Image (tube, rainbow, N blue to C red):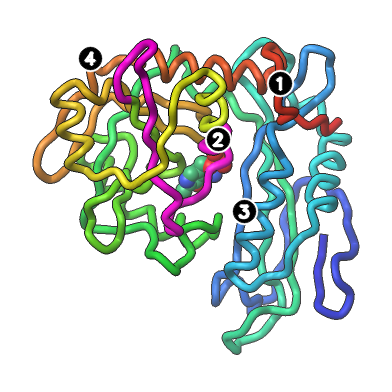
Amino acid sequence: ISYSASNGWHDARVLPYGSISLDPAAMVLHYGQAIFEGLKAYRQPDGTIASFRPDANAERFRSSARRIAMAELPEELFLASLTELLSVDHAWVPQPGGEESLYLRPYMFSSEAGLGVRPANEYQYLLIASPAGAYFKAGVKPVSVWLSTEYVRAVRGGTGAAKFAGNYAASLLAQAQAAEQGCDQVVWLDAIERKYIEEMGGMNLFFVYGSGADARLVTPELSGSLLPGITRESLIHLAEDAGIPVEERKISVDEVESGVRSGGITEIFACGTAAVITPVGRVKHTGGEYTVANGEPGEVTMALRDTLTGIQRGTFTDTRGWMQKLY
Ligand code: PMP
C-alpha cells in the first residue's frame, strides 16, 4: 500500500513475490525511516486461519511510525493486508497439530526521493510471509545469555520502544559479541547505569521467584527504552489468571545473580512472537557465569508456554478473545 501526503493511503495490491525498485535517493536509504512488525498465522482446528492479537501489532506499528515521524497506517488497512495476503497464500499455513506457522512480516519505509533531512512525504507499506518451522526442533532447550555492558540498545527518549529497523542494526555487533562469548543471545542493560536488565535480543524477560503455589514473577518495567512486547503483556494476564503475582519493576544484574545463587530465583525465561517462551539456562557477564537452577526448563516457564501455545493453536479456551480470524 502506498502513502503520499497528498493522496493518503492508496493503491493496495497483492503482487507475486519479487524485486521492488527504489529511487537511489529514496530517503530510507539515507535517513533510515523504517519500521516493522512480526506476527504468526496459525491454522485452527476448524480450518480457519487466525493470528494472536494482530490488533496489538497494528497499534504498535502506528506507535513506531509516530516515533520516527512516519505516516500511520490505520488498523483496518493493517488487518485487511493480512487477510488479503492469506487469501492468496493460505496453503502455506501448516495444518494444525504441530509447532509450525506462517510468519507475517509487515513493514514500512520512506520511499520519497530527497536529500534533505526531514520526514518523508511518501511511504510504502509492504507485507511478506515466510513459513516458520518449530523454533525448538528437538524439544524446548534453554538458551545462554551474555549481559552486554559495552553496548546499549536504547536510551530513554530514544527509539527503543519502537520496532524501528535501526535498533536492530545497532544490536548486531553486541549479538556477535554474545556469540564470541559462547552465548546464544545478548541481554541489554539500561544505558545510564548499566545496572538494570532491559530485554533480550528480540524477546522480553521474566524472572520466577519461588515455586509451586508461592511462585511469583518479576519483569523489567517498560522503561521507555525496551520494546513493549505483546507476548510480555499477554503473559502478565495469563500469569494473573493462574494466580501467579507479577511485578513490573526495575531488576538489577546483582539482584538476578544473588537471586539465582541463593535459589530465590528459580527460573528465567524470555518471551516473544518467534519462540513464544524460551527458558534461559545460563547467564554470563564480564565477571563470570552461572547456571539458573539445574539449567533445565522450569515448571512455571513450561506451564505458561503450554497455555499460550494452546491458545494460539486453538486447543485452549481463548477467554480473552485474543485470537482473531484472518481467513
Ligand atoms: N523485544 C524486541 C527487541 C523484539 O524485537 C521483540 C519481538 N517483536 C520482542 C521484544 C517481543 O515482542 P513480541 O512479544 O511483541 O513479539
Q: For residue 7, which quarter of the picture?
A: bottom right
Q: Image quadrant for the C terminus?
A: top right
Residue name at image x 25 percent, y 41 percent? 146
Q: Amino acid at mark 3?
A: Phe
Pointer 4 residue? 294
CA–CA distance in space, label 1 to label 3: 27 Å
Dot 4 falls on a residue whose secondary structure is: loop
CB under 8 Å between callouts 4 and 3? no
Q: Which mark is residue 36?
A: 3
Viewer-side residue, 201 vs 252: 252
Residue name at image x 63 percent, y 73 percent? 69
Residue name at image x 72 percent, y 56 percent? 19
Of badges 1 and 2, the one in the foreground is 1
Q: Amino acid at mark 4?
A: Asn
Pointer 1 residue? 318
Residue range (magenta): 209-234
CA–CA distance in space, label 4 to label 2: 25 Å
Q: Is mark 2 within 8 Å of ligand 1?
A: yes
Mark 1 residue crowding within 10 angstroms, few (<14) / some (14–19) / many (20+): some
Question: In screen coordinates, is 21 left or right of 81?
Answer: left
Residue 23 location in percent, x, y? 69, 75
CB under 8 Å between callouts 4 and 2? no
CB under 8 Å between callouts 3 and 2? no
